[in-house]
Image: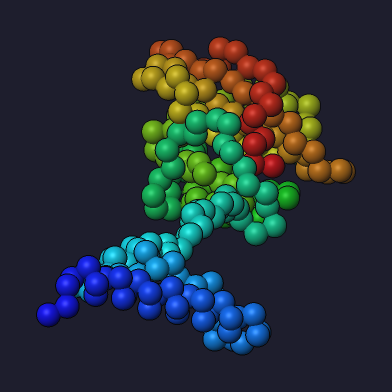
Amino acid sequence: MRHPHLRSSAAQRVRRSAAVSCVVVCSLGLAACARAPVAPDALPTSGSAAPPPSPVRPVVPTIAPTIAPTIAPISAPGRPTTTVPVSLYPASPVASTSVLSSDGPWTRVDTAPGVTTPGLFYALLPQVWVYLPIAEDLPSGVLWTLRDDTVPIIEGYLRAEATRHRAGAHVVLRPQVLGDDRTDTSALVADCVSSARGAPTRTGWGASLELRGGEWSVVSSGPREDACWFA
């Protein structure tokens, strides 16, 4: 039996011989030695296990964050989006059947100049008309309708307006009861007064009313810019 250290020396001589041969072949330009020779000490000895392979990291794709789209406010065709600056008294969910009483200074008529939406029409004076909507019409900006509990307030306002427009002004009144500061004895009315002849113009007007002696009466009135928010 050959001594163990003799077998080891023989193996080392074989490795050195292989390395020298590879150097010679590479010097001749052969592709077989395209890579550098492996050092003898790096070669695994008989009975030793090969080193484990390096772990492979998974490639995680980069996903761009989802951005929610910006949704523009919805507006009626041909009319810009409008924010209501006043608090209107709630409209009736169905078409109103309320009407003004027959003992006031108004007369029921079929229409009013420049008004195309459905509603009630009255002649307050020979050249002064009143338009009172009875059904909501969002595209036309009608969000308020006449109701039984607002009829006395509107009548009190129109009595005062009959005195203010006594000379005749060729206008159409569009009074609406506001929800601001509404109590059992006080109310606010906003009125968009439109011209009935010449160039179309609209002027905002407002009034404060109180319930006195069972009747609604105007206690103060004056210009109100936001009364024509739907114009």
Question: Is any atom of residue 130 visible in this view?
Answer: no
Q: Note whether 14 is above or below 179 in the view shown.
A: below
* Residue at 73%, 26% in the rendered image: 166
Residue lying at 64% horizontally and 80% vertically, measured from the top left? 27
At a point 70% along the width and 34% down the height, the residue shown is 193
Quadrant of the rendered image containing residue 58: bottom left
- Locate residue 220: give its quadrant: top right
Say which of 82 and 44 sits in front: 44
Residue 181, compared with residue 175, is above or below; it is above
Residue 214 at x, y percent in the picture? 39, 18
Residue pictured at 17% horizontal, 72% vertical: 3
How many labels, in total? 0
Relative to 9, 117 lies left or right: right
Q: Nearer the viewer, residue 191 or 78?
A: 78
**Residue 61 pos. (x, y %):** 46, 63
Does residue 169 appear in this view?
yes
- Is 192 on the left or on the right of 13, as rendered? right
The one of 11 and 154 positioned closer to us in this rendering: 11
Quarter of the rendering occupied by the C terminus: top right
Position of residue 129 measured from the top left corner of the image (x, y, whole percent): 67, 40
Q: Quadrant of residue 139?
A: bottom right
Task: Find residue 169 and report its horizontal and vertical position in percent.
Answer: 79, 32
Residue nearer the viewer, 81 or 91: 81
Q: Is residue 55 above or below residue 198?
A: below
Compared across the picture, whether 149 is left or right of 189 comes to left
